[in-house]
Structures are given as C-alpha cells and as structure tokens.
Image (cartoon, rainbow, N blue to C red):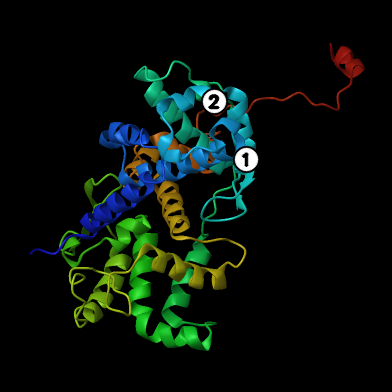
Amino acid sequence: MAELSYHEKQDIANTKKLRELLRTLPPFCAEFFRGIEPRTSARTRIAYAYDLRIFFEFLQESNPKLAGMDRKDFTVEVLEQINVFDLEDYMQYLKCHSTEQRTDMVNHERGIMRKIASLRSFYNYYYRRERISVNPAAKIETPKIHEKGIVRLEVDEMAELLDLVEIGENLTKKQRDFHKKTKVRDLALLTLMLGTGIRVSECVGLNLSDIDFKNSSMKIHRKGGKEVILYFGDEVEEALRAYLVERNEIKAEAGHESALFLSLQKKRLTVRSVENLVKKYAKLVTPLKPITPHKLRSTYGTNLYRETGDIYLVADVLGHNDVNTTKKHYAALEDDRRRSVRNQVTLRENASPSLPNPNLSKNNLEAKE
C-alpha cells in the first residue's frame, strides 16, 4: 500500500478531530457543518466547532431554561430563544471564562471577534434556510480592534539568527549537544523559511521529491489543498544541498521515508517542533520580540516588498487569496514608499517656487508697493 502523503494524513486526523468535537455539540449542528464543508477547510470547521462548543456551554450556564437540559436534546429552536442582550452577555463571558476542559480562559479583542464571527455564520446558515425566523447575531456589534505593529526581524537580526544557528553560540550545554546533531537541518529549515516565506505547515509537509534543484523550485501544498510551485535563491539552495547530504544517510521510520525534514527520532518534523526550534534560537537574538515561524514569513514578505514594491507579487508569493490581507500587513511600508516619491513628479521644469518670506511685515510689503 502506498504511503499516505503528509497532507492526506493531516486530512484524516482533522476529520477524526471534527467528528470527536461534533459529539460535544447538539445533533442539529451536524447540518451546519455539512453545509459549509464545500467552501471551508477542515481546520476552519474545527475552529467553528470549538467556538460553538463554548457558546453552548455559556447557554447551559446562563440560561435557566437550558441549564437542566442535556445538550443532545437541544433543537434548532433553541437559537430563537436567544436575543441580542443574551449575545452581549456572551461577549462579556468570553473575556474570561472556564470551559469543560480548562479554567480561566481569556480572550482578547481578536479572540472575541473570531468567536462572534463563527456564531454569525452559524446563525446565518439557519436563517437563510428559514429554519429560524430571527437572527440576533446579525445585530450585535463586535469589539473594536486595536491594530498592533507587525513583528518581524530586521536585516541585521536575520543575519545574526542564521549565524547563531550555524555556530551555536550562547546555547546551553544541553542545547549544544542537540545542536551538534541538528545544526545542518536547522540552518536549512530557517534559511528556507526566511528565503521563501512559506508557512510552517507547508514547510513540514515538504517531501524529498518536492525539491527541484534544476529549476530552483519546490512544490508546496497551500491551505485548502492547492499545489503551487515556489522558487528559491542561491542561499536557500546551498543550505538545502548541505542538508540533503546528511538527510540521504538517514533511514527514516516507516511512514516517514519521503519527508524532507526529520526529527532526531527519524520522523517527519511537526509544526510544534518547528515552533519550538524557532523560539529557541530567536530569543537569543531578539529577546524582546516574540518571533514565531509566522514572523519569519512576515520578515520575508517585508523584504520582498521593499525590493520589488509590487504588493500583488508579494500577495501571490505568500499565497494570500485577497491582496487586502497583504496590504494590511505592509501598510506602513506602503506609506514609506508614498512618502519617498513625493518629489518624483515635476510640475515646472527647472523651476524653483518662490515662497513668501514669513519675516516680511505687512508694512514692508506696503512700502515695496
């Protein structure tokens, strides 16, 4: 039997996870998840399921009519018993609450907005299909989002990070022991992420057969399953070739033979492993910046935009479906570019406009007349 690809394995795991979550929701919710399946990813549906589970936990805690009911006995008519004031209470609840799995869960503006967006989609689905006659979720106002600055590595920090990975300076004794075994792999992985801007899930999903040195390219799987070809530069190629010399000597565990990046256990690296790896090195270079794999992606996007000035190219390379997503992330750089071209358009050739002298008084002007 042929080995399943990383993405096929992820799809199976996500399907099982969603089925598990659906068992914690009222049975009528299954209709919603079947309805949105054609236009959403499995990860999106899992996020919806988590959000809706919190909503039904809130209803059982706060609504006297539902407190004694088993969640499996809830019908779609329950949604019509909820009004705008109940949903405003729900937003307050989301700021700090406990769940069946964890205590003292805290949500900030973005977390609350996402959960309300999930609830709106849920209500909209049943309202459009005339399963319910009211839609209070459409009337609530989401919290104002205070935009944060984009965290990314500066050019010198990027070089320092790669130097640190190569040399292993300032690591603890235990970290140095691991570094001796993983240095070449770690350098290839971070060089690849900084040099192409791929997502961490795309990176760990790479197979040996996905790398094409002849065309300096690689095949990756975007979110939603789309396959695309990305190109890499000489620095990335050099780091990958050095790692492949080492990788080809490793006999991977069964089911992981095709993986490009392997752990010390000879299995495909996980997303969490890469997140920990990036954090370990980055905190030595920039202790005040919370650098994650996504921040390396932002670093690449920033550098590409500075070099090309083409926001549409950046959106395409990063795999953004909507260029407005890209613009939001690089708005500050766009402002810098607009400012830099303020004198590029000449209105009068060789003309130097005469500006009024603010020191000339009205009397002086009248005397000249």
Look at the image and tell me whether residue 54 can be seen: yes
Mark number for residue 82? 2
Give the side of residue 136 with respect to residue 29, left or right: right
Residue 334 visible to the viewer: no
Task: Give the image location of residue 8, x and y in percent.
Answer: 21, 55
Classify 10 Å Cα crowding around label 2: few (below 14), some (14-19), many (20 and above). some
Q: Which numbered disc flags the more N-terminal residue, 2 or 1?
A: 2
For numbered disc 1, what is the local secondary structure? helix
Residue 352 locus on image (x, y percent): 62, 28
Q: Residue furthest left?
A: 1
Name above or below for residue 222 compared with residue 237. above
Foreground residue among 25 and 51: 25
Asked whether 354 or 42 is in front, the reply is: 42
Residue at the spot of label 1: 93
* Label 1 Cα neighbours within 10 Å, binned few <14 / some 14-19 / many ≥20: some
Residue placed at 51% from the left, 82% from the top?
A: 169
- Which quadrant is the N terminus positioned in? bottom left
Q: Which mark is residue 258?
A: none
SS for callout 2: loop
For residue 109, side relative to residue 223 (left or right): right
Looking at the picture, which amino acid does disc 1 mark? Answer: Tyr
In this rendered view, identify the residue nearer to me: 126 or 300: 126
Residue that lies at the very extreme toward the front in this rendered image = 68
Q: Is residue 330 above or below residue 195?
A: above
Tag 2: amino acid: Ile
Camera-nearest residue between 164 and 223 = 223
Horizontal arrangement in the rendering, residue 113 relative to residue 214 (left or right): right
Q: CA distance from mark 2 to mark 1?
A: 15 Å
- Residue drawn 19% across the image and 60% down it: 5
Q: Quadrant of residue 39?
A: top left
